[in-house]
Image: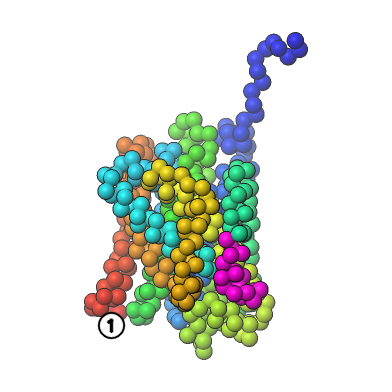
Amino acid sequence: MPGATGSPRKPPASPERRALKGELRGWRSRLVFAGPAIIASVAYMDPGNYATNIQAGAGYGYSLLWVVVLANLIAMLFQALSARLGIVTGKNLAELSRDSFPRTIVWAMWAVSEVAAMATDLAEFLGGAIGLALLFDLPLIVGMAIRAIITYAILVLERGGFRPMEIVIAALVGLIGLCYLAEILIAPIDWRAAGRGILQPALPDAAALTIAVGIIGATVMPHAIYLLSGLTQARADIQDDEDRRKVLRFSNVEVVVALAVAGLVNMAMVMMAASAFHLGYSEVAEIETAYHTLTPLLGAAAAGIFLTSLIASGISSSVVGTMAGQMILQGFLHIRVPIWVRRLVTMLPAFAVVAAGVNATQALVVSQVVLSIALPVPMIALIIFSSRRSVMRDFAIGPVLRICALAGAAAVLSLNFVLLADTFGMAVPFLD
């Protein structure tokens, strides 16, 4: 029979394999591996960031910009370590924790991570729903229902592979970035004051500390630390350590670029709020109030752009949050549930908050403080595994990176301790 003789024809090599072999070069080789950090970067531009950044800019002008910069640098480092963990070990952080720690610690880590996942989804779900409700003059509960449908529709795209999902998320991230570029061009920014806010750290009072911790919780997200290790764990056809080194180089570049964009968006949020609200409207602390106040101050276009970016942020971050929650559940407990069940469970707190009549924006800020308090759990676990040669072999981090990671974790722990001390009425000298 024709074609019966000879060896079977080999399938064409994957784009990732071709890039690792050097057959693809330049921007094409980088584009092949792009995606995981872009998805993770959504966690750093979610509606929780809007709530904390509006309060920071309105209440304290440009003086808390240094917190945004610090949080973004810590996020870059820990996202790079998370990606390294997945690339080198082929496992995500939750799976390694389950395999390495005593059972009681694993259960405790899972419980804290689940609380953080619910706090994350509260912010993401409420934020997007607020945007839809304001833009189309709908009841908040209707906006939440529409958000739920849109999110589930995007999650279904994952059945067609990772690329369709990544393209949609990247488009939404691009939309958020363009919206805030437009806001910066519309708002009269005091660039000298912004420079001082970046270079001169200051915490004017205890309320500023609460917002600072919220900014860190909204930027360095617990679920995002788990997420990137899972997105990179089986992304490329890695055959040896040389392949791993190449993929790590691609990953590190993508992490820096993606999170730099996220950091600039967060800085733009604070600067817009400082420019529009700090002088004369410093009491603005809610997303709804910010929208209604922007219209007479900067015009209907600025207010509309603000809501468009908020909706894009809520939709994209809610999709990514559900993916992370699924990864945490599977990693710690080795249990897989249908995506719609996972989505329903994480939505319930948001519906409960609205049904109880709780102020939505204040709930967003509180959720970010909860995230910051939960954050040390994955941070410490990530440092432990990244430093172990038994886990990472020749890819274990060296003394410099270890010191930087420990310093970042110590900064978060210190801020959390001061916040808790102030909350329970203990004296905090530098805030008196």
Q: Is residue 402 visible?
A: no
Quarter of the rendering occupied by the C terminus: bottom left
- Residue 170, percent from left and from top: 61, 55
What residue do we see at 63% from left, 86% from top? 296
What residue do we see at 63% from left, 82% from top? 295
Q: Residue farthest to the front?
A: 355
Query: Number of labelled discs?
Result: 1
414 lies above or below 186: above
Task: Quadrant for residue 430, please give it.
Answer: bottom left
Q: Can residue 4 be seen in this view?
A: yes
- Which residue is disc 1 drawn over? 432
The amino acid type found where label 1 is placed reads Asp
Quarter of the rendering occupied by the N terminus: top right
What residue do we see at 53% from left, 34% from top? 237
26 lies above or below 283: above
- Residue 27, percent from left and from top: 62, 45
In depth, the one of 373 and 57 nearer the eye is 373
- Residue 225, percent from left and from top: 42, 53
234 lies above or below 113: above
- The magenta region covers 129-148
Under circle 1, the secondary element is loop
136 in the magenta segment: yes
Q: Is the magenta stretch mostly helix, strand or loop?
A: helix
Q: Residue farthest to the bottom?
A: 280
Q: Is residue 222 left or right of residue 420?
A: right
8 lies above or below 42: above
- Say few, some or many: other residues with alpha carbon within 10 Å of mark 1 (under 14 / 14 to 19 / 20 or more): few
What residue do we see at 59% from left, 46% from top? 158
339 in the magenta segment: no
Q: Residue farthest to the right?
A: 2
Q: Residue farthest to the left?
A: 426
